[in-house]
Image (cartoon, rainbow, N blue to C red):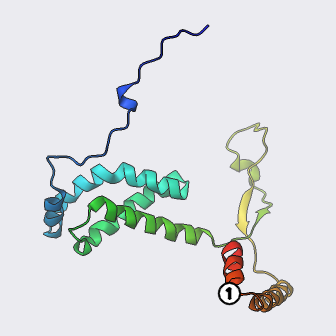
């Protein structure tokens, strides 16, 4: 049987509203950075690095790219600090920079590459361990350009699709485009 006593809540797990450091004037630090004091920017990196990395990871789902996104966001913020409007918060501005960088990265990821498994003589040396039961590691290589025949078929399909889309109403066309493209 379970005991009737309920466990007490752990104070560290309670939600604490986010507050800025009362002793730090971010507007003053931004003015210092704009004036050329590079060391003042270090405060923003220390304070927001984990948040930007977590945000980027949620968008990109890759820890290496998330680190890169956070670093790139800080670099862009530093390079464009003169454009920062002092009426807004630095965190909001930096978050927007990070989100935009991640969106650009996701667009570049959508480029389609066709790969095929290459048969190589040195496959056994790639496994790194002797007696690996899973077998040798396959390498991926970019496929050659599509054949002229395949290009002609693709062009014909695009033309038919374009013609069919012209017969749709504007609303149907936008739904189709949003769903499939």
Quadrant including the C terminus = bottom right
Asked whether 91 or 177 is in front, the reply is 177
Q: Nearer the viewer, residue 93 or 172?
A: 172
- Compared across the picture, whether 115 is left or right of 67 comes to right
Residue at image location 14% in from the left, 66% down from the top:
31
The residue beneath circle 1 is 170
- Up/down of 173 relative to 59, above or below: below
Where is residue 132 shown, x and y percent of the image? 75, 38
Question: Is 111 rendered above or below residue 130?
Answer: below
- Does 149 sit above or below residue 18? below
The secondary structure type at the circle numbered 1 is: helix
Residue 50 placement (x, y as % from top left): 37, 49
* Quadrant of image for the N terminus: top right
Tell me the quarter of the picture where residue 130 sits. top right
Can the viewer see residue 74? Answer: no
Q: Can you tell which quarter of the image residue 96 is in?
A: bottom left
Q: Residues within 10 Å of mark 1 (few under 14, many from 20)?
A: few
Q: Is residue 161 above or below residue 128?
A: below
């Amino acid at each position: 049987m379970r005991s009737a006593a309920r466990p007490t809540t752990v104070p560290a797990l309670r939600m604490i509203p986010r507050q800025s450091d009362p002793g730090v004037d971010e507007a003053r630090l931004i003015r210092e950075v704009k004036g050329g004091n590079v060391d003042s920017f270090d405060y923003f990196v220390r304070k927001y690095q984990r948040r930007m990395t977590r945000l980027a990871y949620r968008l990109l789902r890759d820890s290496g790219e998330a680190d890169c996104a956070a670093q790139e966001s800080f670099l862009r913020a530093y390079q464009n600090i003169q454009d920062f409007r002092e009426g807004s918060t630095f965190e909001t501005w930096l978050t927007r920079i990070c989100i935009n960088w991640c969106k650009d990265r996701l667009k570049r990821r959508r480029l389609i590459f066709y790969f095929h498994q290459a048969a190589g003589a040195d496959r056994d040396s790639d496994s790194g361990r002797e007696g690996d039961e899973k077998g040798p590691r396959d390498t991926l290589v970019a496929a050659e350009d599509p054949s002229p025949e395949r290009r002609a078929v693709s062009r014909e399909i695009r033309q038919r699709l374009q013609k069919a889309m012209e017969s749709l109403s504007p609303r149907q066309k936008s739904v189709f485009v949003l769903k499939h493209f």
